[in-house]
Image (cartoon, rainbow, N blue to C red):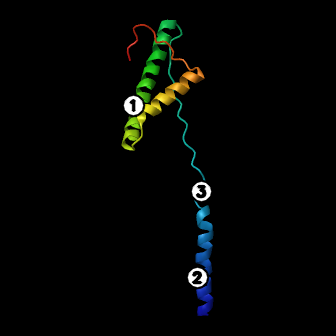
Amino acid sequence: MPALLAFGCSAFMFFLFIIDPKVNTDVPRTQEIIYVENWSLDRSDEEIMAARWGVQCLKDRRDEKRRDAMKTLGRMSGMDVEAIEREAEAKRLARGDIEVERPAGLTC
């Protein structure tokens, strides 16, 4: 009887080790957030473009903060950040990417 009990306990523990990697392996779905804005139907083209450039200014500020953080991390890691930036600029120009001209009087 003690041998059977020892075998049963060992088998139960072995079974737990087998099923453990399969527990909670489902990837949780992220919730989808939908932002809705209401605009009047009589907006002028200038108002529409001003709103779009306002959003672009926010994106540019966010990207600049991220770029500065990455540069700081690169410098702390001992990388030549300026050389990496020059290479990236050369690749961007080689691809033919162009900078969109900003409207006159736009201040971000």
10 Å crowding of disc 3: few (<14), some (14-19), many (20+): few
Pick whichever of labels 3 and 2 is earlier in the sequence: 2
Disc 3 marks a residue whose amino acid type is: Thr
Q: Horizontal placement of 52 versus 94: left or right?
A: left
Decide: is 42 above or below 77: above
Q: Are marks 2 and 1 in contact (CB under 8 Å)?
A: no
**Mark seen at residue 56:** none
| Residue at 60% over, 53% down | 26
**Mark seen at residue 9:** 2
**Mark seen at residue 65:** 1
Residue 69 versus residue 81: which sits nearer the camera? 81
Pick whichever of labels 1 and 3 is earlier in the sequence: 3
Decide: is 96 above or below 76: above
| Residue at 48% over, 7% down | 46
Disc 2 marks a residue whose amino acid type is: Cys
Q: Horizontal placement of 58 versus 12: left or right?
A: left
10 Å crowding of disc 2: few (<14), some (14-19), many (20+): few
- Calculate the distance from the C-alpha at mark 3 to the C-alpha at mark 2: 26 Å
Secondary element under disc 3, as helix, strand or loop, is loop
Question: Does any portion of residue 3 appear in the rendered image?
Answer: yes
Give the labeled residue for mark 3. 25
Residue 82 versus residue 64: which sits nearer the camera? 82
Question: Does any portion of residue 44 appear in the rendered image?
Answer: no
Q: Are marks 3 and 2 in contact (CB under 8 Å)?
A: no
Question: Which mark lies nearer to you, 2 or 1?
Answer: 1
Secondary element under disc 2, as helix, strand or loop, is helix
Q: Are marks 1 and 3 in contact (CB under 8 Å)?
A: no
- Calculate the distance from the C-alpha at mark 2 to the C-alpha at mark 1: 57 Å
Q: Quadrant of the C terminus?
A: top left
- Calculate the distance from the C-alpha at mark 1 to the C-alpha at mark 3: 35 Å
| Residue at 59% over, 61% down | 23
